[in-house]
Image (tube, rainbow, N blue to C red):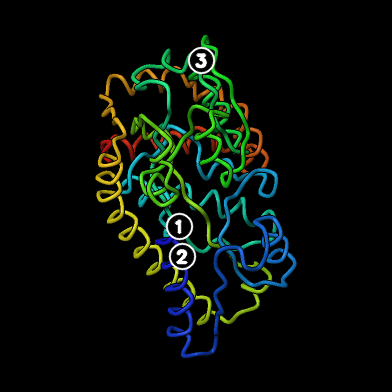
């Protein structure tokens, strides 16, 4: 995504500036250094110093906590939950990344997920009936979709993101989760007919560093990286929010029918998702292992509920 790449490049420039040139980070974007998993392995081994990753559970066992569905749903909520200075999700993801040898620096938000499709306006869970729906390897999202489509003939299909346009165009799948900017930048609005801003999940990637290298740095350089992280994250939040409104307009101009779901309608999807059971299955075992005796599952959910209550859902 263009906005994220710009923020990552800013991050590298800020590190150089804040360290008076003592650290010079060379930026390689758009997969130049390899696939997602290849770059992950390289940073873990220390052959590459930093990277920006989606913390899928096959590489970060605690990574599901980065983006459990039906938690934060807008930028103001995310700014609190992912705050590098004490945000509940940032803190627990710091532990998740530490487990695999990385230092979490900041999070690059991309926005809230809605549901795009070629079948009908999505207004209630029963509308999933008959759909073939594209999912990724994010298990929390997969189980959430399974629950929301329970009792219908919804079929879930694992398809690479790069193949999604053609899959929608040819009818291999009828729907997918998506964010406003991707609908435009990936031109998915050309091959869908309907979009519901359900805002049921939050998409953010993590910017991380080889932890052994980070720990070897003197305190002043660690501080410089921290301040560069804060500034780059702030810029990323501003840039992606600026991209949302023109993206909405572009989707409307393309003839996609947008269904602006009500709070009551949205609540029906959340109830169908049965998130407490998914948290118990996916999150609680890892949290109990890493935070024994602390009931961390409940602590996180209570804090997220507080953030949501204080910051109502908006685009």
Dot 3 or dot 1: first in sequence order is 1
Compute the Cα span from label 3 to label 2. 37 Å
**Quadrant location, the N terminus:** bottom left
Judged from this view, the residue extending furthest toward the right is 45
Please, what secondary structure does the residue beneath circle 2 have?
A: helix
Please, what secondary structure does the residue beneath circle 1 have?
A: loop
Residue 283: image location, x then y, percent: 59, 35
Q: Residues within 10 Å of mark 1 (few under 14, many from 20)?
A: few
Residue 13: image location, x then y, percent: 45, 80
Residue 150: image location, x then y, percent: 53, 14
**Nearer mark to the viewer, of 3 and 2:** 3
- When the figure is inspected, residue 201 is found, relative to residue 50, above or below; the finding is above
Circles 1 and 2: CB atoms closer than 8 Å: yes
The residue pinned by badge 2 equals: 5
Compute the Cα span from label 1 to label 2. 6 Å
Q: Residue at x 56, y 35 (%)?
A: 167
Q: Residue at x 55, y 32 (%)?
A: 134
Q: Is residue 118 left or right of residue 42?
A: left
The residue pinned by badge 3 equals: 130
Compute the Cα span from label 3 to label 1. 31 Å
Q: Residue at x 64, y 61 (%)?
A: 102
The residue pinned by badge 1 equals: 1
**Nearer mark to the viewer, of 3 and 1:** 3
- When the figure is inspected, residue 97 is found, relative to residue 6, above or below; the finding is above
């Amino acid at each position: 995504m263009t906005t994220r790449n710009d923020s990552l490049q800013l991050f590298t420039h800020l590190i150089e500036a804040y360290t008076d040139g003592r650290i010079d980070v060379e930026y390689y974007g758009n997969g130049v250094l390899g696939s997602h998993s290849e770059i992950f392995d390289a940073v873990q081994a220390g052959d590459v110093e930093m990277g920006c990753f989606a913390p899928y559970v096959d590489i970060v066992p605690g990574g599901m906590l980065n983006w459990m569905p039906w938690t934060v749903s807008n930028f103001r909520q995310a700014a609190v939950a992912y705050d590098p200075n004490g945000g509940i999700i940032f803190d627990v993801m710091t532990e998740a990344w530490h487990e695999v040898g990385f230092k979490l620096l900041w999070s690059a938000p991309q926005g809230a997920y809605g549901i795009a499709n070629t079948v009908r306006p999505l207004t209630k869970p029963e509308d999933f009936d008959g759909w073939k729906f594209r999912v990724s390897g994010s298990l929390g999202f997969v189980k959430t979709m399974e629950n929301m489509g329970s009792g219908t003939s919804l079929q879930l299909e694992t398809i690479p993101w790069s193949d999604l346009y053609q899959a929608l165009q040819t009818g291999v799948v009828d729907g997918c989760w998506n964010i406003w900017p991707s609908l435009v930048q990936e031109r998915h609005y050309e091959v869908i007919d309907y979009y519901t801003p359900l805002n049921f999940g939050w998409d953010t990637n993590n910017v991380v560093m080889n932890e052994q290298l980070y720990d070897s740095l003197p305190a002043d350089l660690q501080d410089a990286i921290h301040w560069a992280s804060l500034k780059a994250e702030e810029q990323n939040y501003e840039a992606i929010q600026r991209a949302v409104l023109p993206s909405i307009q572009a989707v409307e101009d393309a003839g996609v029918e947008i269904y602006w779901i009500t709070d009551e309608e949205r609540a029906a999807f959340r109830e169908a998702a049965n998130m407490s059971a998914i948290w118990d299955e996916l999150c609680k075992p890892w949290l109990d292992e890493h935070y024994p005796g602390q009931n961390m599952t409940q602590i996180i959910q209570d804090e997220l509920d507080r953030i949501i209550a204080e910051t109502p859902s908006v685009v």
